[in-house]
Image (spheres, rainbow, N blue to C red):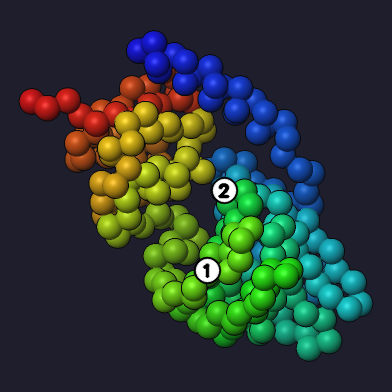
Amino acid sequence: MALVASFASVVAVGLYTFHFSAPLADYDTKTGEQRSVELLDGSRLYLNTASAASIEFTEARRTVLLHAGEIYVEVASDADRPFVVDAGTGTATALGTSFSVKRRHEAFDVLVASSRVGVAVSDAGSTVVEAGQGVRVTATGIQPVEPQSVQMALSWRSGRLVFDGLPLGEVFAELDRYLPGRVVIADSAVKAIPVTATFSIARIDTALETIEQTLPVRLIRLSDRLTFVFAASPP
């Protein structure tokens, strides 16, 4: 419990700092909120939970600056003005398409739902991602393009989060984006536990209870905004 208390003070400071360091944006969403916006060119922008984006349209280019979180775009055709999502460490340029971009600090993921997207990083090359494929971009470059389940990755657009054998550590990282607070894994042994589940975003607060009831983990809730995860004690 002393360890938990120590973690709690660190996490509390982290939450405070994050809340007040979020960039100003044209469009944003709070934790658990989603939003749909029609842009001036007729494109449609969808913002997932805890996301922020700004729009810069000129006569030569249409740019969405993704400050944080995740967006999905349905791009209106305009051959004279490329549509670009700038995620900080690189860009994703629509080649007549719909796609999502998820920013993760100094990295971002691109998933293509239809047509193609050109992904580029300054001084680190570029690649083309086809429909049904995804790629991760980090500060060190572009990782290999891989097939991905578009339906599963974009399940948030239909109000669900779907996981199929995903490690528990990654599941908690995703749930963290929808919960009003933080989930901290205090026992690294549980991170690799595979999870196959579907959670309703509208009832995301029940996800932690379901995980605790079905997996060998123990949750300690210090408040409605801070939960620690440990391996369950042997019977």
Q: Pick the residue in front: 155 or 217.
A: 217
Instruction: Name above or below for residue 79 compared with residue 49.
Output: below
Residue 202 picture quarter: top left
Q: Residue furthest left?
A: 235
Q: Residue furthest right?
A: 59
Residue 65 picture quarter: bottom right
Residue wearing tag 2: 49
Residue 101 appears in the picture as rendered: no
- Measuring 58% from the left and 69% from the top, which residue is drawn there? 142
The C terminus appears in which quarter of the rendering? top left
Q: Pick the residue in front: 209 or 85.
A: 85
In the image: residue 11, left or right of residue 73: left
- Measuring 60% from the left and 45% from the top, which residue is drawn there? 50
Q: List x then y, in percent, for residue 125.
A: 67, 75
Q: List x then y, in percent, for residue 157.
A: 50, 61
Measure how far apart labels 2 and 1 are at the Cα level: 25 Å
Three-letter code, disc 2: Thr
Instruction: Name above or below for residue 155 compared with residue 199.
Output: below
Q: List x then y, in percent, for residue 103.
A: 61, 55
Residue wearing tag 1: 143
In the image: residue 67, left or right of residue 114: right
